[in-house]
Amino acid sequence: MSVMKVSSQPIRGQKPGTSGLRKKVQEFIGEHYLENFVQSIFNAMGECGGRVLVIGGDGRYHNREAVQVIVRMALANGFRRLLIGQGGLLSTPAASCLIRKYGADGGIILSASHNPGGPDGDFGIKFNGANGGPASEAVSAAICQASVVIDHYLITDSPDINLDSPGEHTVGDATVEIIDPVADYAELMESLFDFPKIEHLLQQGGFTLCFDAMHAVTGPYAVEILERRLGAQPGTVINGVPLEDFGGGHPDPNLVHATELVRRMRGDKPPDFGAASDGDGDRNMVLGSSLFINPCDSLAVLTANAHRVPGYRNGLAGVARSMPTSPAVDRVAAALDIPCYETPTGWKFFGNLMDADKITLCGEESFGTGSSHVREKDGLWAVLFWLNLVAELNQSADTIVREHWQRFGRDYFTRHDYEEVPAQQAEALMDELRQQLPSLPGRSSHGHTIVAADDFSYTDPVDGSVSHSQGLRLQFGNGERIVLRLSGTGTSGATLRLYANSHEPDPDMLGIDTGKALASLLAAADTIAGISRHLGRDGPDVIT
Ligand code: VG1
Ligand code: CO
């Protein structure tokens, strides 16, 4: 095996966004594109000699080819040991689990998460550090910086590794291990949840479940854990075979894209519980038999009931949520008398808090929930947590949520996405609103009066780093709030996200349709921010 030094030149735009670098497949397969970015990761890591790397992806188009390239580059850069999921597959939470369990120095995850795949879809690459979590803003900036000065990359001429047969290969001085992508993760789940109790619920309790893997990476995980280990009926997992194009679907677990699950839940005999996960297995949508459980509420309910689950029996150090997420969890934290942190959007901000033992659970409105068991959000973990609660409380998920609202009040929440907006229009909208911020307090629209307005800045309580411009917040009276920000995960144009939430303490007002509950607040947002005026659109593309 010989190491080749290949000349290259910087490629514009290799700047990681909210969650790694995401581009159209066609851009990623361009000459040196992947190689440049991977070498930039290695350069940002510093000395790679003797180090250990985890590699895997969500199985989308180009996954296997990219794994082979990364293996050859890692060998050329001197890594001592490579751990690769069989078939080149690893869910994002499983990769995080492996990095931590085997003391790796980092991991590379190939995924564009919930973005569609296939030759015309998206591809992505994320780098996670030794704590198992997404690269911090500082590391991401160092990778981007390396990408703008790159002049060569290193790669071996070694043959492709057989990704499908588990076992150890020795290549030069290094060991390349093809490992079962599911086993270590499943073992971790068994250590956190009461599997015998869930098994009893699924087998003797007559409880039915439908898990939609959306032809993405969680299929093998869900089949192993739900059907094989917990004894759920065969067929509980639907769309369970990972496909390179996700079967033509959009692997985003929400009511719009998880079509088959939604059809079953709205059918004659709906399962007692429904769930779905995204491309790389870190998101979750959970549904009671007659109730969509908003991710903000899910985080609040899991926090309130964590002591009922073995892994969290000793209580929680604290909790955190991303800024646009509703404050439902804040109320629970106050009742439990534990700290609650508000971070910018993106999982990378939770890592420091977990490493410093400041939080145990955290979540985002974007169908992300997780805990310090790994350093990523974790879709199946959330589903198992819910099943454990249902089994423990002997109540349906719907009842658990409704009783939670009775106790804490309900935080109505919705997000409107305006996708593929011309970037200039989106920027103009945000700039105009940003300039108005100082004069907004006191302004009323559609019966809602602004009491405070700012551009969210976050100071990390652990390392003191500051992240500016993380979203425009308009706080109204009565706990109502509007947030606007631009997405950092899209690959064409800009996506404007408009978030709205309100708090309803009246026990007789907890069953209102979310769209109705927030209609006038959303109308106020449109007037104040001029959304339809700037974008020339009648309404959002996706409502969650
Ligand atoms: C979106 C979500 C954010 C999430 C991120 C990655 O980012 O809003 O909450 O952490 O996706 O999720 P943005 O910048 O597009 O709003 V995933 O499942 O891609 O890893
Ligand atoms: Co994801």
Image (cartoon, rainbow, N blue to C red):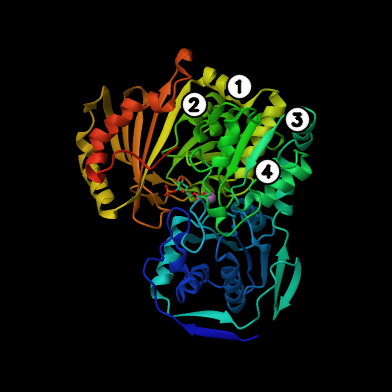
Tag 1: amino acid: Thr
Image spot of residue 73 (x, y percent): 57, 75
Please name which of the two marks, 4 or 3, marks the residue nearer to the observer: 4
Q: CA distance from mark 4 to mark 3?
A: 17 Å
Q: Residues within 10 Å of mark 3 (few under 14, many from 20)?
A: many
Residue 201 shows which numbered tag?
Answer: 3
Q: Residues within 10 Å of mark 1 (few under 14, many from 20)?
A: some
Q: Would you name the residue on which mark 4 appears?
A: 237
The residue located at (60%, 35%) in the rendering is 264
Q: Which of the two residues, 177 or 23, is positioned nearer the viewer here?
A: 23
Where, quadrant-wise, is the C terminus in this rendering?
top left
Residue at 51% x, 21% y: name it.
408
Q: Which residue is mark 1?
A: 399
Secondary structure beneath dot 2 equals helix
Residue 79 on image: x %, y % = 63, 73
The residue identified by callout 2 is 331
